[in-house]
Image: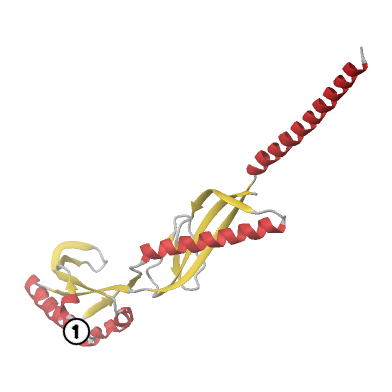
Amino acid sequence: MGENNRANLSNAAIILALGLVITGIILGSTWRKVSRSNVTITVTGSAQKEIRSDLAVWSGNFSNESATMTDAYQKLQQSSTKVKNYILSKGFPQEKIIFSSVNTSTLYRQTSEGVSTNEISGYRLSQSVSIESDDVDKIDQLSREATELILEGVEFNSNPPEFYYTKLSDLKIEMIGLASKDAKMRADQIASSTGNEVGEVRSSRMGVIQINAKNSTDVSDYGINDVSSLEKTITAVVTVSYSIE
């Protein structure tokens, strides 16, 4: 074999070796990129906001009883008038006052041992009244003062009011956005501490919305929608997975 042939073979071998090295580098880099693209970080973000109810619903009920149905009804009508006048005196318009239909119960005489007989002793008629208003403070006050009707001879029971926030749909969207920002911030902090950067969102899941009485820490898998408190706290939670770059 001549000197030229040996030189050519040597050069070819060198070129082949360099090609294999370069190919190895490219393949290694590509593999690292592919492998890295499969790395994700999953974080949970949350957001809280204090809200005040803007709608309240209150109800109460009253009753009268007598030996005859007619007399019981007349007494109930008198009680109904007193209830209406009382609510009007508290500044509520008449069109907001809703009375239910009259419920009737038959009363039976009992023996000295407390056993009911088939003998009718009288009738008990009852009715409820309700008000829905955006003046939540006035409703709250009415619910606590309405038993003053007892002083007027009305057998009255005031139920706890229910408080609602009517802009909840729009607020939920806002809260999810705030919780998502919190999740991104948490992911950035974790990634930067290891010299990495957060990439695209791979998956996201929204948790249930919790609406609790202010300062309450109750949590439910099905979500909470408190209606007993005027002041509330709404909490939103999201879980997001990001790729790592």
Q: Quadrant of the N terminus?
A: top right
Left or right: where 56 falls relative to 41: left
Q: Does 212 sit above or below residue 204?
A: below
The foreground one among 181 and 156 is 181
Q: Inspect the image, locate mark 1, and give the three-letter code of the amino acid beneath it.
A: Leu
Q: Secondary structure at mark 1?
A: helix
Q: Does 161 sit above or below residue 92?
A: above
The foreground one among 232 and 78 is 232
Residue 153 visible in the current orientation: no
Residue 225 percent across, percent down from the top left: 40, 63
The foreground one among 56 and 175 is 175
Residue 11 percent across, percent down from the top left: 85, 25
Residue found 47% across the figure and 61% down from its top: 177
Residue 169 percent across, percent down from the top left: 36, 62
Mark 1, residue position? 88
Residue 112 visible in the current orientation: yes
Which quadrant of the view contains residue 26? Answer: top right
Residue 153 percent across, percent down from the top left: 20, 84
Left or right: where 121 falls relative to 19: left
